[in-house]
Amino acid sequence: MYMPDPGFVRGTLLRRGQLARRGAALLVAGLVAVALGLSGVLVAVVNPVLIIGGLVAVYAGVDRLVWAARRRRLDLLLGLASAWLVLLVGAAILAPVLPLGEHEDVAATITDPIFLEPFTYGDHPLGTNGAGLDMLARVIYGARASLTIAVMAVTIGLVVGSAIGIIAGFYRRKVDTVIGIFTNALLAVPPLILLIVLATVLDPKVRNMAIALSLLTIPTMVRLARANTIAYSQREFVLAARALGATKGRIMVRELLPNVLPPMLSMAVVVMSALIVAEASLSFLGLGIQPPSPTWGNMILEAEANDTMTEHPFILLVPGTVLFLTVYSVNLLGERAQQRWDPRGAKL
Amino acid sequence: MRALLRRLGQLVAVLALVSFGVFLLVAALPGDPAAAILGPGRPPEDYAALRAEMGLDQPLFQRYFEWLGQALTGDLGSSTVPPYLDVSDRITAALPVSIELACLGLLIALLIAIPLALVSAYREGGLVDRVVSGGTFAILSIPSFLLGLLLIMLVVETLGWLPRSQWVRLSDSVAGNLEHAILPAIVIALPEAALFTRILRNDLVRTLREDFVLAARAKGMPPSRVMLNEALRPSSFSLVTVVGIALGTLIGSTVIVEYLFSLPGMGTLVVTAASQGDFPIVQGATLVIATLYVLINTGIDVVYGYLDPRTRRVHA
């Protein structure tokens, strides 16, 4: 992304010292504003404005300091996104050993309060749902399901997609045509409809969901692998390998695969966010992992059912925010990865 | 001409494969449709008789060709769930709703995207550009059902401006139809608008670096005319393609929105049928949606050739 030089103010370029001083001033002002907003001394309406404005100032300040010191722009957004994903993945992996509330056994929460608001600084940091289940625990166990399914599906897509794509791109002619028709046929059915049809046939379990979702990723992966294989097949190193008498299999695995894989990996990150959305959508339609096992999608469905969200908006907002932050972070990571490793695909 | 014929051949092959896939998926299903219809506890001859009547005792390929033949004449069988309505009738009732939603959504998306792209491309890297870029990126990260629920919470529940469900047919009342279609259409439009804005903005930025734009500027043409008359048209090719693809996919992708607002379109039809195990409807609807998608896409490809002279083949 193009970013103007922060030292360029009203037509003149600031010297490093000046820029650093401005940055430090912005940073301090921002911190004071955030502290004021958080302490809640002032009128309630002003607080969010102070906090947001303060954070922007802190960001601008740190950005200028970093630029003055190292001549590098600060990619704070990327840092935050990575931090969020690390936190989420960590929590999801460690979920069984973390001191969380009950996430699915309704019988264990009979005595717990229902629809407890979040941030009440009690046993339930993100509140409880209509059955007294802990929202934080449900969000984290939901992440477990979502992430497992998405990672499994992407892996299947990568392996199958690269194999088929390289074969199509290497052999061309009839093989290519047949594979092309198959991928086009898969692409002709809208993703969600395909998933719904599969969901009617398959049992909604984590493994089956991953297989169903991987079908969505395969056509994209095949196309990408095929296009890159065709491009690389005409390069000299492939010709050299051929001249040395390498077998077709060896050329595909040792020469083409290592070159075709990097852009596919950055594509995999983008595909992953689409898969998280697809899985959530399916659960939201009631066709995914079934309650009481939590997923973000069925938690949001819970908010929609009987208009729960009108009275208790947080039932929608808690899983909604987590879902949004995750998809946003993965998208951002994918975009940056594509800019770095696959300049052609970085257009969007 | 030969290219057109080859494309047509591929089209037929893709459609045949899709129809076979759809057929196979349901045919390979565990469980006996006859048992599902009659219920348990009947003498075995009854089941066998019904199976013969439904043609289930025939070999797979014969059944496929029979099904396909009937489908080509517009007969997609009847639903297996009471009141056993005709599948084709259900689909012809649902299709206009989805098509209207998709078209309305696309229209709104373009109305939002074109001005936004023009404004942000005008000063690349400026404040407006960065805000629009950040905003569109964020919108693209909100799943449509979440976006829909948030809008419902805001516009319907809190502000009380618009009603939530009940569909009024366009033929019954234009105003009533619009009142009910506008919010779902907006939910469909927002992510598309974000995508269109990004695509058009990038192409515009590239066009604005060209010499003829510089020439127009140097002649003293006002910026608004440079943007609208000179830059917009040569920058719109990718947008046209993407809009075309969107039209194809949207007919099947309005599922979530239809479900959210309980609109009687294709999406609701498929989801309800899927949850009831009503396979003829799932089969028929998927076939229709996929066919439309493939046809629209091929159509777009052909039209695109006329729009952009560079992609045209040179004819001898």
Image (cartoon, coloured by chain):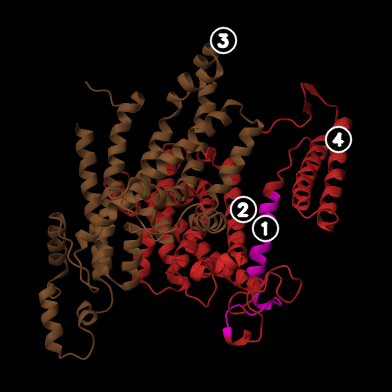
* Magenta stretch bounds: A79-106
Front tag of 3 and 1? 3
- C-alpha separation, residue under disc 3 versus residue under disc 1: 49 Å
Q: Quadrant of residue B223?
A: top right
* Mark 4: amino acid: Arg
User: Looking at the image, can residue A137 be seen?
Assistant: yes
Q: Are marks 4 and 2 in contact (CB under 8 Å)?
A: no
* Mark 2: amino acid: Ser
Question: Which residue has dot 4 on it?
Answer: A22
Q: Are marks 1 and 4 in contact (CB under 8 Å)?
A: no
- The local crowd at label 4, few if under 14, some if 14 to 19, many if 20 or more residues have their Cα within 10 Å, is some
Question: Which residue has dot 3 on it?
Answer: B218
Give the mark, 1 or 4, whose residue is nearer the N terminus: 4
Question: Which residue has dot 2 on it?
Answer: A329
As rendered, which of A4 and B181 lies closer to the eye?
Answer: B181
Q: Image check: A154 left or right of B79?
A: right
User: Looking at the image, can residue A248 be seen?
Assistant: no
Pointer 2 and pointer 3 on the same chain = no
Q: Are marks 2 and 1 in contact (CB under 8 Å)?
A: yes
Q: How many marks?
A: 4
Which type of secondary structure does the marked residue at label 2 adopt?
A: helix
User: At x 23% / y 23%, what residue is drawn?
Assistant: B315
- C-alpha separation, residue under disc 2 versus residue under disc 1: 7 Å
Q: Where's residue B233, x and y in %?
A: 43, 24
